[in-house]
Amino acid sequence: MTWSILGAGSLGCLWAARLSRAGLPVRLLLRDRQRLNAYRALGGVTLIEDGRESLYPIPAETVAQGAPIQRLLLACKAYDAESAAASVAARLAPGAELILLQNGLGSQQAVSAHLPRTRCLYASSTEGAFRESDFRVVFAGHGQTWLGDEHGGPTPAWLTELEQAGIPAQWSENILERLWRKLALNCAINPLTVLHQCRNGELAGHPDEVAALCDELGQLLHACNYPAAAQELQGDVERVIAATAANFSSMYQDVAQGRRSEIAYLLGHACREGDRLHLALPRLRAVHERLRAYLVARGLPDT
Ligand code: NAP
């Protein structure tokens, strides 16, 4: 069965290149004819790994045209997920599977609500990649991807294809808990790196602020019924800050480069869930408001 990949950016190309070199059928779905022509002119996806680059001439088509889709990897940003999924909805075959690779929470539920006849699986990945230029991607950090089904159901047989392609993936019986834990780690670190304009490691100089956010995120996780995701949160946040001390967070990089951030699906989602559960969360809301003001002042979307 063909792997269709919509979102030929960092992670989409990273998955496509590895599936393709394992001999598995894969095709890229591009926005329009202009993007398709640009892709064809380059001859394929270039993946740069450990300084070596390889070109993968993966077949591509536009979202509008082609055979029915049985298995789709949606690899766009969270804020593009609904519209990107809608652009191929008519091509999804009955019983198709859709793997949602978006960070944060909220976009997955929005997409699956529109596709009741499609099995929507959620993914949480610690792999790292960035786009050097169009269809040219650097594999920047090895990691792991967890996949799971919010509604239960069997482990997909195609996990073995991911293994065959060298994509480290594991089935998770509680993918929402994993996504919440990652969201909490992200909310405790990334917004502060933007507001303090610093590398992750410099947050060690703001221990009270970090501790207050971890405390409120812990309250939120408990109220959402994910107590395991709240365990040792502050300790883990401090470990991440120390282990990635020299790095700029993804949100810091997005803002520094004038790109839209995924704030609505991270801190925004946390605050919306706080509203729903009538939690005060004053420190979290204050950081959210300061971050939104910071983005607006730089002409960037605050949602
Ligand atoms: P990215 O490099 O920006 O790639 C997103 C791609 O989606 C772009 O190529 C974009 O096309 C395409 N796209 C958006 N809307 C589309 C549409 N309607 N039709 C066709 N293509 C569309 O993003 P990414 O870094 O791979 O991130 C994807 C998700 O994975 C995010 O939620 C991110 O937080 C998460 N994630 C990323 C990493 C990482 O290291 N990169 C790690 C973990 C998680 P254009 O090029 O035409 O705009």
Image (tube, rainbow, N blue to C red):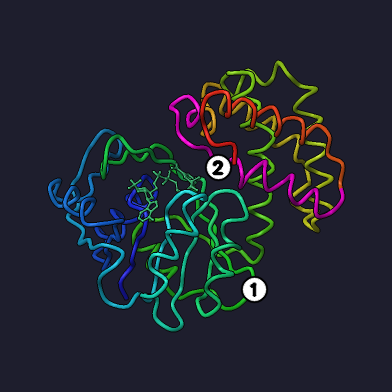
Separation of residues labelled 1 and 2 (CA atoms): 25 Å
Q: Callout 2 environment at 10 Å: few (<14), some (14 to 19), or many (20+)?
A: many
Quadrant (top left/top right/bottom left/bottom right) for the N terminus = bottom left
Label 2 SS: loop
For the point 53% across and 70% down, which residue is it? 120
User: Within 8 Å of ligand 1, the CB of disc 2?
Assistant: yes
The amino acid at mark 2 is Glu
Q: Position of residue 202 (x, y in %)?
A: 63, 17
Q: Quadrant of residue 59?
A: bottom left
Residue 8 in the figure: left or right of residue 203: left
Residue 148 in the figure: left or right of residue 134: right
Residue wearing tag 1: 151
Q: Position of residue 213 (x, y in %)?
A: 77, 33
For the point 27% across and 36% down, which residue is it? 133
Q: Is residue 72 magenta?
A: no
Residue wearing tag 2: 262
Asked if 37 appears above or below 112 in the picture, the reply is above
Q: Callout 1 environment at 10 Å: few (<14), some (14 to 19), or many (20+)?
A: few
Residue 217's tag is none
Residue in the foreground of this view, choosing between 201 and 130 = 130
Quadrant (top left/top right/bottom left/bottom right) for the C terminus = top right
Q: Is residue 258 magenta?
A: yes
Q: Quadrant of residue 196?
A: top right
Q: Position of residue 268 (x, y in %)?
A: 67, 43
Q: Which residues are magenta?
A: 253-278
Residue that sits furthest to the bottom in the current view: 94
Q: Quadrant of residue 192?
A: top right
Residue in the foreground of this view, choosing between 184 and 285 = 285
Residue in the foreground of this view, choosing between 253 and 32 = 32
